[in-house]
Amino acid sequence: MDKELPQSKMTVKPGKLFVNLTKSQLPGQEPFYKGTLPFHPSLTLEDIAERAVKNRSSYSRGTLIASFRTMVEEIYGAIEDGFNVDFGLGRTEMTVKGRFKTEYEKFDRERHAICIKLRPSPRLNQLAGWFPAEVIPYYRNAPLPNEVSIHNDCYRQQEDREFCVIPANYTLPLFIHGSRLKLMGDHPEVGIIIRQEEGEKKYFINPRMVFINESTHLAFMLPEPLTPGRWVAEVHSQYNPSYRLYQKPRVGMVTLTVLDTTASGRGD
């Protein structure tokens, strides 16, 4: 399996994960709260192939997809032959589920089962442990920002750029891409907040200062350049797709890195 990366390879930190808490209770136990990560859409194999073509591969999108599917079929075949498979990201492991009453008991499909588990690689576990996290209130149909950029188009439509990274001393328009972003409503909290992830600096962008205000796209000017480090962009809006405004603003958040290009390139 893939080994952990050395710290020198851990460059720009991943964005903060925003955790939603929901109440849960098991029989005979005190109530507790379970954390989930609500703001994480899935990418398809086709999406991953497109990213690979843009970022690191000279092969065509179709070639990558066909090659990957061939390898997946071969992995299925190897498992059918009784092998566990180490595929870099992790390893498949066949296990036996269920309890046996004695050492001579026969395998019973009604009480026992053969299961296949996926054991993540050390590198995958390392990546999961690297994410900063913050518990926030979560509302259904809240704004869903997923990218802050210096570009007018979203990440998938551009090559050779880092995701949610802007340079220090940037003084041109900043863009937020996502869904349900439109700033609507007359509540005083409606607008955009740009704040330090760890720190006291905070900027409020009034809706009248947002010159592109669409459900998938916001654009605005910062009052001053952001200092290097980790920042959070918050979108506060009463917007409802039915145009029946919510009584209170709902909030969506995304993190970004302001990178000091004169430094070593690390985002910490």
Image (cartoon, helix red, strand yellow):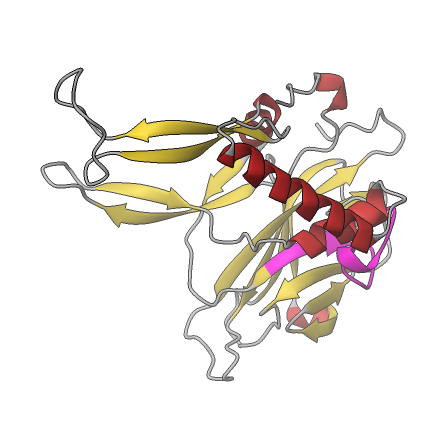
Based on the picture, tell me whether residue 18 belongs to the magenta stretch: no
147 versus 25 height, above or below: below
Based on the picture, tell me whether residue 153 belongs to the magenta stretch: yes
Q: Would residue 224 appear left or right of 144 to someone viewing this image? A: right
Q: Please provide percent x and percent y for residue 195.
A: 63, 46
Report the front residue among 132 and 221.
Answer: 132
Quarter of the rendering occupied by the N terminus = top right
Q: Please provide percent x and percent y for residue 70.
A: 69, 45
Q: Would residue 170 appear left or right of 8 to someone viewing this image? A: right
Report the front residue among 157 and 84.
Answer: 84
Q: Please provide percent x and percent y for residue 117.
A: 43, 33
Residue 196 appears in the figure: no
For image coordinates 16% across by 23% down, the residue present is 105
Residue 105 appears in the figure: yes
Q: Please provide percent x and percent y for residue 42.
A: 58, 53
For image coordinates 34% across by 34% down, the residue present is 114
For image coordinates 61% across by 51% down, the residue present is 254
- Span of residues in magenta: 145-161
